[in-house]
Amino acid sequence: MQVGRRSTKHLSAVSPEFREKVGQGTNVQWPPTDKFVASFGPLSVDGVLSWAKDAVSLSTFGGSNEVCLTPANCFINVNNAYYDVNSVLKATLSNNFGAELGAKYKWDNFTFYGGYIYANLSNPSDAYAGGFETISSGIFVPAGSVTSTDYLLSTGKLNSPSYAFNKVLQTIWTGVKWSVPKDWMRGWGSLDLATAFYYQWQNNYNYTWNTGIINGVPYGYATPSACTGTGPYISSSKCAGSQSGISFFLDWKPVKRVDIYAGIMLTNVYGGIANGYFSTTTYTVPGTNTTYSVNTARTQNYDPTVGIRIRF
């Protein structure tokens, strides 16, 4: 949906295809879209809604599934079936609903940004209990490696579903860009400086799956599970948690079509999102066979970037 009267005269002049499909002038036929776009002078607002059925999240198998005959001859064991380590992945399926709202406002040499994203992940519509091929030739998800619905297992019990309780992930961000005045650059191109803040949080969807067989009939149900520990040592990644980030960025355009840029982003993770963010170091006491391990939290990350871009 387009709000506001904007002429398509210039676009129609350079693109006959655009002129044929949309039209020319201020009263035109815009193509259908799932986006809402509103423009009020220097302020513009965009909104997007999305839905994905049986969305797939792929991951590698952990060390507990790896069986090695020799250091160079290893396999992945899934329910006593052995696969090449480079050929199999495990999958988590979900039905995803998402909504996004973004805004931009321009004032003088400043441009302000802000936005919000809502994502709700629930159990998928289909089980795919027998596994499936991925889009990469030769790589597949074997049977018994799909977390999806509470489908019946070979044991006669019900599989623990992806999201017995829905996962809700929300994100907000805001930022500002300042374009250095042209006369300040004295012919040395243009320079933009920007900074932004991001914050994301999730609900507590941690649960215990209870399943069994009564009189030959399988059952399964979820009960809330308490979260213990803090930070990277919290008991589950399904516990409530958050992460925050702040970034700084500069982009210098010395000549047309060339960008030289640099920036840095600092992020911190907390609660369930921080689960597992630690490293373990093992030390040996000199002169003895005694060893001890020390865990170190790694919940803060610095991510610098620098580069050059040439547009043709």
Image (spheres, rainbow, N blue to C red):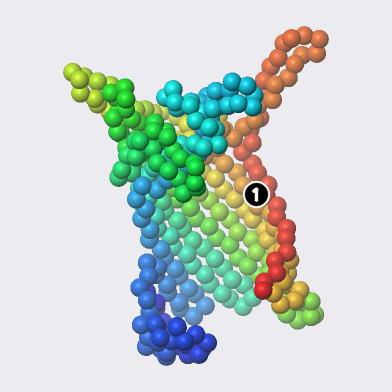
Residue 15 x, y percent position in the rendering: 49, 85
Q: Which residue is mark 1?
A: 266
Crowding at label 1, few (<14), some or many (≥20) Cα neighbours within 10 Å?
some
Residue at the top extreme of this rendering: 288
- The residue depicted at 57 percent of the width and 68 percent of the height is 112
- The residue depicted at 37 percent of the width and 76 percent of the height is 31
Residue at the left extreme of this rendering: 215
The reply, left or right, for residue 5 in relation to residue 271 is left
- Vertical position of residue 8 compared to residue 138: above or below: below
The quarter of the rendered structure image containing the N terminus is: bottom left
- Vertical position of residue 50 compared to residue 311: above or below: above
- The residue depicted at 65 percent of the width and 52 percent of the height is 265
Q: Nearer the viewer, residue 69 or 126?
A: 69
Is residue 261 something one can see in this rendering? yes
Residue 307 x, y percent position in the rendering: 72, 60
Kind of residue at badge 1: Leu
Residue 187 x, y percent position in the rendering: 79, 80
- Vertical position of residue 78 compared to residue 304: above or below: above
Q: Nearer the viewer, residue 294 or 67?
A: 67
**Which SS class for mark 1?**
strand
The quarter of the rendered structure image containing the C terminus is: bottom right
Residue 105 x, y percent position in the rendering: 53, 72
